[in-house]
Amino acid sequence: MFKKFTITDKLLFISAFLSLIFSEILYFKGEQNAAIFIGIWVPSILAFGIYLKLINKEKND
């Protein structure tokens, strides 16, 4: 499954995963507002990755 990923895909996936983990760590340390703020980054990072994929697909067509 990961063989089809480009380096950009891997970096975006890792950054989304790390922000999710960091958000959970902050939440359980008692910093709920900061955790929610960072947790909102996860779908934004993934949406940005989808956007990049769509732009690359249009350029290749």
Image (cartoon, helix red, strand yellow):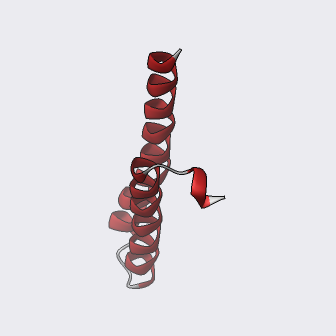
Q: Where is residue 47 in the image (x, y as percent from the top left)?
A: 49, 39
Q: In this view, does 55 lie above or below 53?
A: above
Answer above or below: position of 34 versus 50.
Answer: below
> Where is 21 relative to 12, above or below?
below
* Up/down of 59 relative to 23, above or below: above
Quarter residue 48 falls in: top left
Residue 39 lies, in percent from the top left, at 44, 59
Which residue is at the front of the view, 44 or 36? 44
Q: Which quarter of the rendered picture does the N terminus lie within?
A: bottom right
As drawn, which residue projects farthest toward the right?
Answer: 1
Q: Residue at x 45, y 26 (%)?
A: 56
Which residue: 45% across, 73% down? Answer: 21
Q: How many labels does the image show?
A: 0
- Front-lying residue, 8 or 48: 8
Q: Out of 34 and 12, give the one closest to the viewer.
A: 12
* Front residue of this view, candidates 6 and 54: 6
Q: Position of residue 23 (x, y in %)?
A: 41, 69
From the top left corner, tell me how far across and down residue 29 is, in percent.
38, 85
Which residue shows up at 39% across the image and 56% down it? 11
Q: Measuring 40% from the left and 53% from the top, which residue is drawn there?
A: 7
